[in-house]
Image: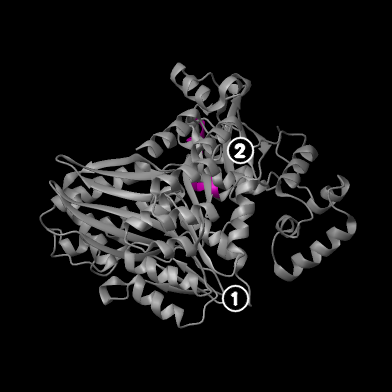
C-alpha cells in the first residue's frame, strides 16, 4: 500500500451516512469550543461509535478493519516496533504478508505517524485500521515490562554490592529520590501490576531468591525472580512509604499508602510478616477512581436481581452479602448504594478500608489504632439520623448486635459476612452469640456470591469435557449434558496465555420467609437447613456456575473449583 492520503473525517462520515450534515455542523462547533478532536466529540455525543468511525475509515481507504478483541497478535512481530513508537503513533504490528508488515493504526490518515513507522522499522508496511480504545488496551497487554523489572532488580543488586554506595541513596532518602534504584524498581512493579489488572502484589523472600508475584483474576502468577539481597531494601522502602516501624522485623505490621499512576490514584494496603528467610510483604491495590458498576451490569440472574432489589427497597432490615475475601461483596453492595443514593436519603458507610468513593455518601474509615472501631463508629452513626447504613463487615458479636438493633429500629442495614454459602449465614450469626430473636426479626435476605474466571473471547474454542468433567456435569444437567457447547481459552496475548480474561460472579439467594423465621425462633438448625434447601433447590451457587458453563462464559474446571470450595 502506498502512503495513505489525508482524509477529511467529517466529509467521510457524511458521505457514508454515518452522521447527518446537521450533526457534523454541531460537532464542528463543539470542536472549536473545546479543542477536542472531531472524532472524540462525535463519539462522546453518541452520534457515532468509535468502531463505526474506524470501519468507515477502512472502507474509505480500501483497507481492512481489525477487531483487536478477537485478534491474536504475534509477540515476535510486536517487538519489531518499540513501545515508545507504538504509543506515540497509536500503532501495532499485526502480521506479515508477502514480506510486508501489516500495521494497525488508530488514525491511518496521520501521515507523520506513517512516515515515522516506516523509518523506525525500515520495512515496507501496509495499513489496517483499529479502534483507538482497543489499541490502547492491547498495547498495555502486549508490551510486558518483565524485562525492565529484571533489569532494575539487577541494577539494585549491583548498587547494594558497591561498598561506597550509601544505603540512604539506594532507598531514595536523599535528593533525587525518584532516581533511586529501589524507587524505580517499585514504581515499575506498581505500573505493571496496574496494567495487568493485578489485585495483589506478593513480595516473598526465599532462601536464594526474591520472588515477586501478581494475583490476577484470583490466581497468582510469578512476575519476576531476583537476587535475595535486594529484599531488605524493598521492604524498608515500603515500610517508609506506609509509615511502619522500620526497626521492627520480628512482628507482623499493617499499613497503607497512596500513589498516583497514569492519572489513577491507587490506595495500597500493606501487610508485612516475618518468615524464615526475611519479611514477606503483600499489598492489596485499590484503584480509587474505579467506575462503580450498576446492579443491571453485575450479570445477576433475573430472578435473583428482582428479589435483591425488592429487599434493598425496604425501609428497614438487614441485607447481607456473603462470601470469602475477594469475592466481590463490596462491589455488589456499592452497586446497590449507587442505586439507592438520592437526595432524600442519608447514607452512612463504616468501612475498613473505604474502597469506593461515591458523592452524596458519608463514608467513615475505621481506625483500630486510635480505637475508632466498627462498633464505636456504628454507635455514633446511629445518632446521625441515617436512613441507610453500610457496615463493611459483621466481624464480631458486638458489631453484629448493634447493626441488628439498627435494622429493628427503622434503618436499612447493608453488610457482609464471611460464610461459605447463604444458608449457613444465619447459623453463623447464632454461633457468634447474637440472640435468636435479633437474627429472626432483622435479616431480610442473604446473597452469597463467588467469582469465577471468564473465558477469554480472543482465544475461546470449543472442546470436549474430560470423562471426570462429563460425569460431574451429568450430575448437574442429567441427559442435557451433551446438548451444550463447552468453551475454554487456549491462551493468547490478550489473557497472558491463561485462557481467562476477567471474572464474573455467581450467586445464590436466601429469603428469610416466615417458615425460616419460625425455625430460627425454635432454635432448630436442622429444621432451618431443611427448609432453606427446599427454598433454594435448583438455584444454588453451584447451579449458577453451571449456567455460566452452558452459556460459554466459564469453563467446567472453574465451576468444579467453586463446587469444591462449597463442599469444604
Task: Tell me if label 1 and label 2 are in contact, CB under 8 Å.
Answer: no
Residue 32 found in image quarter:
bottom right
Between marks 1 and 2 in the image, the one whose residue lies nearer the viewer: 1
Residue at 88% across / 54% down in the picture? 20
Q: Any magenta on residue 86?
A: yes
- Which disc, if any, is residue 69? 2
- Which disc, if any, is residue 324? none
> Can you name the residue that lies furthest to the left here?
163
Q: Mark yes or no: residue 131 visible.
A: yes
Query: Between marks 1 and 2, how big is the CA–CA gap?
Result: 42 Å
Residue 399 found in image quarter:
bottom left
Q: Choose the circle earlier in sequence order: 1 or 2.
A: 2
| Image spot of residue 385 (x, y percent) | 51, 81
- The answer to whether 131 appears left or right of 245 in the picture is right
Tell me the quarter of the image containing the N terminus: top right
- The answer to whether 234 appears left or right of 521 in the picture is left
Q: Any magenta on residue 144?
A: no
- Dot 1, crowdedness within 10 Å: few (<14), some or many (≥20)? few
| Image spot of residue 297 (x, y percent) | 62, 51
423 relative to 366, above or below: above
Q: Mark yes or no: residue 187 visible.
A: no
Tell me the quarter of the image containing the C terminus: top left
| Image spot of residue 317 (x, y percent) | 52, 66
Residue at 46% across / 60% down in the picture? 440
76 relative to 533, above or below: above
| Image spot of residue 217 (x, y percent) | 44, 43
- Magenta stretch: give its range: 77-87
In terms of depth relative to the viewer, which is nearer, 542 or 151? 542
- Dot 2, crowdedness within 10 Å: few (<14), some or many (≥20)? some
- The answer to whether 3 appears left or right of 11 in the picture is left
Q: Which residue is mark 1?
A: 345
Amino acid at each position: 500500500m502506498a502512503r495513505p492520503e489525508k482524509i477529511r473525517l467529517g466529509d467521510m462520515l457524511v458521505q457514508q451516512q454515518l452522521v447527518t450534515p446537521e450533526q457534523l455542523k454541531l460537532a464542528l462547533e463543539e470542536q472549536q469550543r473545546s479543542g477536542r478532536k472531531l472524532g472524540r466529540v462525535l463519539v462522546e455525543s453518541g452520534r457515532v461509535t468509535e468502531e463505526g468511525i474506524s470501519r468507515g475509515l477502512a472502507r474509505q481507504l480500501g483497507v481492512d478493519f481489525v477487531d483487536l478483541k478477537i485478534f491474536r497478535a504475534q509477540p515476535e512481530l510486536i517487538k519489531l516496533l518499540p513501545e515508545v513508537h507504538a504509543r506515540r503513533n497509536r500503532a501495532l504490528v499485526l502480521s506479515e504478508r508477502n514480506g510486508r508488515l501489516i500495521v494497525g493504526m488508530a488514525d491511518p490518515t496521520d501521515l507523520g505517524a506513517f512516515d515515522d513507522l516506516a523509518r523506525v522499522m525500515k520495512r515496507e508496511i501496509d495499513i489496517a485500521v483499529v479502534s483507538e480504545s482497543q489499541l490502547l488496551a492491547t498495547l498495555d497487554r502486549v508490551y510486558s515490562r518483565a524485562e525492565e523489572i529484571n533489569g532494575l532488580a539487577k541494577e539494585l543488586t549491583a548498587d547494594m554490592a558497591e561498598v561506597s554506595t550509601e544505603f540512604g541513596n539506594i532507598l531514595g532518602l536523599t535528593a533525587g529520590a525518584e532516581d533511586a534504584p529501589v524507587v524505580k524498581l517499585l514504581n515499575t512493579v506498581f505500573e505493571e501490576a496496574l496494567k495487568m489488572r493485578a489485585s495483589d502484589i506478593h513480595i516473598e523472600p526465599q532462601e536464594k531468591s526474591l520472588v515477586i508475584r501478581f494475583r490476577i483474576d484470583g490466581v497468582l502468577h510469578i512476575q519476576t525472580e531476583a537476587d535475595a539481597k535486594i529484599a531488605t531494601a524493598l521492604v524498608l522502602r515500603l515500610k517508609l512509604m506506609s509509615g511502619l516501624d522500620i526497626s521492627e522485623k520480628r512482628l507482623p505490621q499493617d499499613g497503607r499508602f497512596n500513589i498516583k499512576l497514569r492519572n489513577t490514584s491507587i490506595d495500597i494496603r500493606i501487610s508485612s510478616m516475618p518468615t524464615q528467610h526475611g519479611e514477606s510483604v503483600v499489598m492489596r491495590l485499590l484503584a480509587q477512581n474505579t467506575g462503580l458498576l450498576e446492579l443491571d451490569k453485575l450479570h445477576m440472574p433475573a430472578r435473583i436481581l428482582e428479589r435483591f432489589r425488592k429487599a434493598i427497597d425496604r425501609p428497614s432490615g438487614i441485607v447481607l452479602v456473603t462470601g470469602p475475601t475477594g469475592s466481590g461483596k463490596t462491589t455488589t453492595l456499592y452497586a446497590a448504594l449507587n442505586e439507592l443514593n438520592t437526595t432524600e436519603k442519608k447514607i452512612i458507610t463504616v468501612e475498613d478500608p473505604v474502597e469506593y468513593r461515591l458523592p452524596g455518601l458519608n463514608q467513615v474509615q475505621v481506625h483500630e489504632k486510635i480505637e475508632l472501631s466498627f462498633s464505636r463508629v456504628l454507635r455514633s452513626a446511629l445518632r446521625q439520623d441515617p436512613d441507610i447504613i453500610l457496615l463493611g463487615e459483621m466481624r464480631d458479636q458486638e458489631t453484629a448486635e448493634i447493626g441488628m438493633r439498627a435494622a429493628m429500629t427503622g434503618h436499612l442495614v447493608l453488610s457482609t459476612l464471611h460464610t461459605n454459602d447463604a444458608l449457613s449465614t444465619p447459623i453463623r450469626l447464632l454461633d457468634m452469640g447474637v440472640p435468636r430473636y435479633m437474627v429472626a426479626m432483622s435479616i431480610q435476605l442473604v446473597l452469597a456470591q463467588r467469582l469465577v474466571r471468564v473465558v477469554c473471547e480472543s482465544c475461546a474454542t470449543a472442546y470436549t469435557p474430560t470423562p471426570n468433567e462429563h460425569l460431574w456435569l451429568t450430575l448437574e444437567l442429567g441427559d442435557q449434558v451433551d446438548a451444550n457447547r463447552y468453551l475454554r481459552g487456549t491462551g493468547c496475548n490478550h489473557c497472558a496465555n491463561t485462557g481467562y480474561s476477567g471474572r464474573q460472579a455467581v450467586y445464590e439467594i436466601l429469603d428469610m420467609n416466615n417458615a425460616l423465621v419460625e425455625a430460627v425462633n425454635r432454635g432448630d438448625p436442622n429444621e432451618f437447613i431443611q427448609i432453606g434447601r427446599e427454598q433454594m433447590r435448583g438455584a444454588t451457587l453451584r447451579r449458577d456456575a453451571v449456567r455460566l458453563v452452558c452459556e460459554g462464559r466459564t469453563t467446567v474446571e472453574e465451576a468444579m473449583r467453586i463446587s469444591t470450595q462449597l463442599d469444604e
